[in-house]
Amino acid sequence: MIVTRKELSFDYYWRASSVGNDPDIGHRLGDGMFNKDQGYEVLGVINAVGKTHHIPKLTLREIEEYIRYWLPGHLSRGEAIEKIEQQFFESFASLRKFSLSDH
């Protein structure tokens, strides 16, 4: 499941703030520092986690809240994803088990 820009709950900046931080160049998600104020970075991290773990949009919104209020601001994109996965791992496992048992 993925989230679109319009579905984000918080306001973000949508322009790259410096050279080498251009969302159109197509950086790998683990490269560079993660900026919690840049919408394209938050969206990219949320959707990367969502695609990897096949989680519902409601949980993706909880991840957005976690990023906003509790995720440290000095992480690379890869480290941000790792912290999110650590925080939500038990939830992801439960969701996976639940969705597999339905089919």
Image: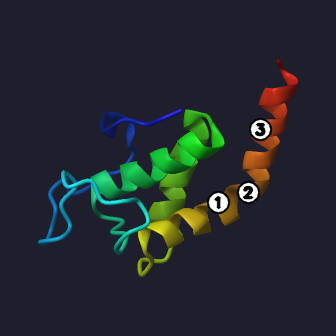
| Residue occupying image coordinates x 20% and y 67% | 21
| Residue occupying image coordinates x 59% and y 45% | 52
| Residue occupying image coordinates x 47% and y 44% | 47
Pointer 3 residue: 96
Pointer 1 residue: 85
Q: Is 97 left or right of 20, judged from the image as shown? A: right
Task: Say which of 57 and 51 sits in front.
Answer: 51
Pointer 2 residue: 89
Identify residue type, mark 1: Glu
| Residue occupying image coordinates x 79% and y 54% | 90
Quadrant that contains the C terminus: top right
Q: Is 6 left or right of 96, judged from the image as shown? A: left
Q: CA distance from mark 3 to mark 2?
A: 10 Å
Q: Secondary structure at mark 3?
A: helix
Residue 53, given in percent of the width and then of the height, sits at: 64, 44
Crowding at label 3, few (<14), some or many (≥20) Cα neighbours within 10 Å? some
Identify residue type, mark 3: Arg
Q: Is 72 left or right of 86, judged from the image as shown? A: left
Q: Establish if 63 lies above or below 70.
A: above
Residue 11, given in percent of the width and then of the height, sits at: 28, 52
Crowding at label 1, few (<14), some or many (≥20) Cα neighbours within 10 Å? some
